[in-house]
Structures are given as C-alpha cells and as structure tokens.
Image: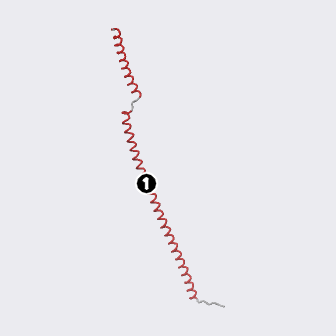
Amino acid sequence: MMVQVEFWQLVTLLLAFLGFLFGAGRLLLSQIDRRLSERFTAMEKAREEGGKHWDERFTRLQEQAQRDAQNVAELERSLLRFQGELPLLYVRREDYVRGQSVIEAKLDALYSKLEVVQMKGVKHD
C-alpha cells in the first residue's frame, strides 16, 4: 500500500498544521496574558487595601500623638500652676523654726514682765 500525496496537498496540510499550532499558541498566550492581568489586578487591589490599612494606622497614631502632646501640655500647665501656688501653701522648716523662735522669745519676755510685776506685788504687800 502506497500513499501518494501531492506537493500542494502536503503544503496545505503543513500550512493547516502550522495554522493550528499558531492558533493554539495564540490561545495559550492570550490565556497567560489574561491570568497575568488578573493576578496583577489582584495584587494592585491587595496593595491598595494594604495602603489603606497603613494610612488608617498612621492616622490613628498621629491622632494619638496629638492627644498625648495635649495631655503633656496640660500636665505642664498644671505643674507650673502648682509651682506658682506652692510658696503660698508651703512653709519651709527654717522659716517655721524662725517664726516659732520669735514667738517663744516674745512669750519669754512677757513671762519675765509678769514675774517682775508679781515680785513687785509681793513686796508691796
């Protein structure tokens, strides 16, 4: 059994086969391109969501930092106010001792005068 194929039939068969290979390759490449596009789209979406997450996180951190700064400023004002009121409410030990000594000296002087008055009163009787 012999199969005879003419040249034009062979060329046509070869062109059909090459066309099939070209079509299959093109279909395969278009699917790969579509998959890559989907993958890049998903990656871009994930990147944007991640960016939103970090933006929200940084915004919250900035707000917290501002609240902390306000609290520190309020604490500083309170401390300065306390430092201003402190001399009015607090007497140093040395000042108290000096004041007490003055009072005791005056009481001693008064006692001495009373003693003198009592002695004069006893002598006149």
Asked if 113 appears above or below 73 in the picture, the reply is above
Can you name the residue that lies furthest to the left here?
124
Q: Residue at x 36, y 36 (%)?
A: 85
In the image: residue 92, left or right of residue 15: left
The three-letter amino acid code for the residue at tag 1 is Arg
Name the image quarter holding the N terminus: bottom right
Question: Tag 1, which secondary structure?
Answer: helix
Q: Residue at x 55, y 81 (%)?
A: 20
Q: Nearer the viewer, residue 99 or 117?
A: 117
Dot 1 surroundings within 10 Å: few (below 14), some, or many (20 or more)?
A: few
Residue on which the image places disc 1: 60
Q: Position of residue 41 (x, y in %)?
A: 47, 67
Q: Nearer the viewer, residue 37 or 5?
A: 37
Tell me the quarter of the picture where residue 3 sits. Answer: bottom right
Q: Residue at x 55, y 84 (%)?
A: 16
Q: Nearer the viewer, residue 85 or 14?
A: 85
Asked if 17 appears above or below 70 in the picture, the reply is below
Asked if 121 appears above or below 47 in the picture, the reply is above
